[in-house]
Image (cartoon, rainbow, N blue to C red):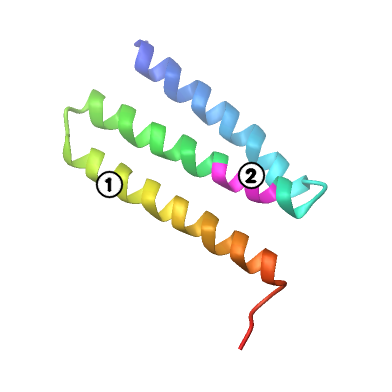
Amino acid sequence: MSIFEIFLYILLITTSIVLYRVIKGPSLFDRIVGINAIGTKTILMIVVISYVFERPSFLDIALLYAILNFIGSIVISIYIERGGVTE
């Protein structure tokens, strides 16, 4: 078992712990932070897989996913701040 496999298993375990917090979170903000953490851990997994399989094109996918994760966080924050959809 290589160090990369161990790292991926640790990421999967921590992601499952965060997923529990997203499902059972006491507040909406805990759930949003949990979803952001899952997105960040997914990006880390893609980067590690890119390194292991020597596929630099996966880094582009990870960068795109990071941008979408950031934009999603901004959109959800604006939605919560305004109290819903405004016309």
Q: Is residue 64 above or below residue 87?
A: above
Residue at x 64% of width, y 50% of height: 32
Could you say whether the residue bearing mark 1 is in a helix, strand or loop? helix
- Identify which amino acid the numbered label 1 is placed on: Ile
- Identify residue for label 2: 33
Question: Mark 1 — residue?
Answer: 61
Q: Nearer the viewer, residue 9 or 87?
A: 87
The quadrant the C terminus occupies is: bottom right
Figure check: 77 above or below 40: below
Q: Which residues are magenta?
A: 31-36
Name which residue lies at 63% across and 43% down. 34
Would residue 41 be counted in the magenta stretch?
A: no
Magenta stretch, main secondary structure class: helix
Residue neighbourhood size for the residue with mark 2, other residues' Cα within 10 Å, grouped as few (<14), some (14–19), many (≥20): some
Q: Is residue 72 left or right of residue 31?
A: left
Between discs 1 and 2, the one toward the N terminus: 2
Could you tell me how far apart the alpha carbons at marks 1 and 2 are, in whole angstroms? Answer: 22 Å
